[in-house]
Image (cartoon, grey):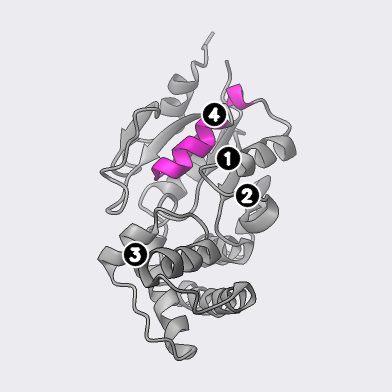
Amino acid sequence: MKLKCIIFDVDGTMADTERDGHRVAFNLAFEEKGLDWHWDENLYGKLLAVTGGKERIKYYQDEFLKQQVLNKQAIKDLHAIKTKHYIKLLETGKIPLRKGVEKLIKQARDENITLAISTTTTPINVTALLKANLGEQAQSLFKVIAAGDIVKNKKPAPDIYLYALEQLKIDAKNCIAIEDSEAGLQSAVQAGLKTIITTNQYTKNQDFTQAQQIHSDFSRIDTQLLKNIIGENHV
């Protein structure tokens, strides 16, 4: 078996975007819209049980407020404001890539291993993060960027990974996914992908029994490790 592609999740995996990025941007959007909502770190950790920003707002209303303050269109409008604030945070360099991510990307490129992204976050969030940390041409480093509402069902459904694999035209057996959450792991595994986990403060206690390996950061993750997990034979 040969390692042909590495598929990255984004939020919490490539960068610690949740606590100091998305959460902050949500709170700024609430303030701009005159809502008396505030998501502290503890509450936001609970809201991460649901993937997708618009879905998270709906979940907050349903499960915590127990009332529908915003309808579907209003949620969509609020999320657009949140995205605007998140992009500003990215552009000011306040959300760096996790240490070791850039090194792994370069190593994979040097070895002609294809790179791809599979995430529930919106496409503009992905491109802004990449551009802020890897330069203007960063998007071209990835053959496929599968993001946001491009599929109907978000993680833990396998749809976004299945879409990425279809676009890549590479068999799942030759790819490895890098995720940070239980929902992401389930999504990747259901798509037939071997997966390694890089935990963060919000996900470190989740169930990762289906993962091939679990790491607290990228310090030990390199292409040789990924090849070993795939079972690549060397002549």
| Residue at mark 2 to residue at mark 3: CA–CA distance | 32 Å
**Which is closer to the viewer, label 4 or label 3?**
3
> Is 62 included in the stretch rendered in magenta?
no
| Residue at mark 4 to residue at mark 1: CA–CA distance | 20 Å
**Label 2 packing within 10 angstroms: few (<14), some (14-19), many (20+):** some
| Residue at mark 3 to residue at mark 1: CA–CA distance | 35 Å
230 lies above or below 59: above
Residue, disc 2: 141
Based on the displayed image, in which of its 4 quarters is residue 219 positioned?
A: top left
Identity of the amino acid at label 3? Tyr
In primary-sequence order, the first of circles 2 and 3 is 3
Farthest residue, direction front: 67
Residue at left offset 34%, top offset 28%: 209
Image location of residue 109, percent across then percent down: 58, 40
**Left or right of 19, for residue 115:** right
Helix, strand or loop at label 2? It is helix
In primary-sequence order, the first of circles 4 and 3 is 3
**Label 3 packing within 10 angstroms: few (<14), some (14-19), many (20+):** some
Rendered-image quadrant of the C terminus: top right
